[in-house]
Amino acid sequence: MKISTFFKQISCIIVLACVFGLNAKADVGYAEFKSTGAGMNALETTIGAATMTVETWLYIDNNAGFFASNMHADKGFLLGFDGHFKFQLDGVSVWIDPATWKGNWTHIACVADGTNMIVYVNGVSAGSQPCAGYNTEADNKPLYLGRAPWGNPFVGKLADFRLWNVARTADEISQNYQKRIAANTAGLVKNFNFMEGTGDNTADLVNPDGNKGWFMGTLDTDYAWGVAAKTPAALQYDTKGQYEFDLTWEGTTGNKWTVEITDPSENVTYRENLVQNTSNFSGLAAGKYKFRVKEASFIATAYSDYLEVTLPLATTLDENAKISGMNLVQTDNLITIKGIEAGNQVVVYGASGQLMFKNIASDEVMEISTTAWQDGLYIIAVEGGKSWKIIR
């Protein structure tokens, strides 16, 4: 009981790092259509209204093929490339020059509001055409991704495909095209986010038990799964000095990150658009902090689990300071503690909680070599409640 109480006392003063949380992670996935034999059949789909919106992220190397369509006998919608990008609806088309899209992830939103067809590129209106709206005669026909029902395959990548039975407004598109949409959002008919990463089908998030999207062709030859951004993992920190450390995490090269910081008073602040998977913190007050990170490609991932860091109150330590009758002297490579009761245990922890030293005092003097230690913050604790914080 004496030893267990001792370790409980130590846990209150050392710097702690713990990862916790049970939130489901959400990376950013995509489907790649690699050959003319590729495509996806999402089976019978019903919009049921004259108003509609089709939106998706896409990546193209050329401007050929169709990537979304339920068109049958010229009834329905068609999105794809025939020299220029074409959004066709019941025989009416809007044409957009896709020259700037090549080699870049681009968001396309095609809206029919009952009066006009409107195309938005990366949240900005790029063209329109008068149109009466979606013809529901095309309902209950298969929805195809990566090709049209009659062929004309698309070679490229699709991510976060959304089909609506409402006309999304300009503000709704511009404010949400880089965000995830809740599956129960009003008007959302289908949403494929291609997060499975394996197999030959992808689930509709709106109705997971309903029709899936089924790939055509052979995995890795005709189609493939991909990940554009991964939820950050392995958050850790490297102490640089008193109350200063570098926070680091695993991340995808070329993406950007946001760090959320919750301070001891539960105030939340953010560091955004970080281009490296590290961030320096200094001058923090004592107390418990929580950090979590998300990564962004064209859409942001979910946040990582929290990394919790407790910074202890500082203690002033002169070279020959005495605390409760014990005397500690620190030289370059040696710590000497005098006044210890024989039989008491002494432990030393590094700033991130790693055990550096543990021994039982055989008499009132103990010497601890620090030759192999890196420069940084260390906590020395003696059984019975005596403790020091030193910087080597």
Image (cartoon, helix red, strand yellow):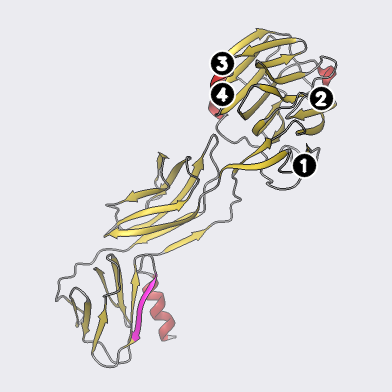
User: Residue 10 at what x, y percent from top left?
Assistant: 37, 74
Please identify, in this view, whether the residue under mark 3 or under mark 1 is nearer the observer.
1
Task: Give the vertical position of 212 relative to 171 (above or below).
Answer: below
What's the CA distance linking mark 2 and mark 3?
28 Å
Type of amino acid under label 4: Trp
Type of amino acid under label 3: Ser
Q: Earlier in the sequence, mark 4 or mark 1?
A: 4
Q: Residue at x 23, y 67 (%)?
A: 315
What's the CA distance linking mark 2 and mark 1?
19 Å
Residue that carries the numbered disc 4 in the rendered image: 101
Are dots 2 and 3 in contact, CB under 8 Å?
no
Mark linked to residue 81: none
Q: Residue at x 57, y 21 (%)?
A: 121
Residues 251 and 387: in front is: 251
For the C terminus, the quadrant is bottom left
Are dots 4 and 3 in contact, CB under 8 Å?
no
Type of amino acid under label 2: Pro
Residue that carries the numbered disc 1 in the rendered image: 218
Q: Earlier in the sequence, mark 4 or mark 2?
A: 4
Type of amino acid under label 1: Thr
User: Residue 296 at what x, y percent from top left?
Assistant: 51, 39
Residue that carries the numbered disc 2 in the rendered image: 149
Q: Earlier in the sequence, mark 3 or mark 1?
A: 3
Are dots 2 and 1 in contact, CB under 8 Å?
no
Task: Give the vertical position of 86 relative to 341 (above or below).
Answer: above
Q: Dot 4, how many residues are within 10 Å of its Cα: few (below 14), some (14-19), or many (20+)?
A: some
Residue that carries the numbered disc 3 in the rendered image: 125
* Prevailing SS of the magenta stretch: strand
Q: Earlier in the sequence, mark 2 or mark 3?
A: 3
Please identify, in this view, whether the residue under mark 4 or under mark 1 is nearer the observer.
1
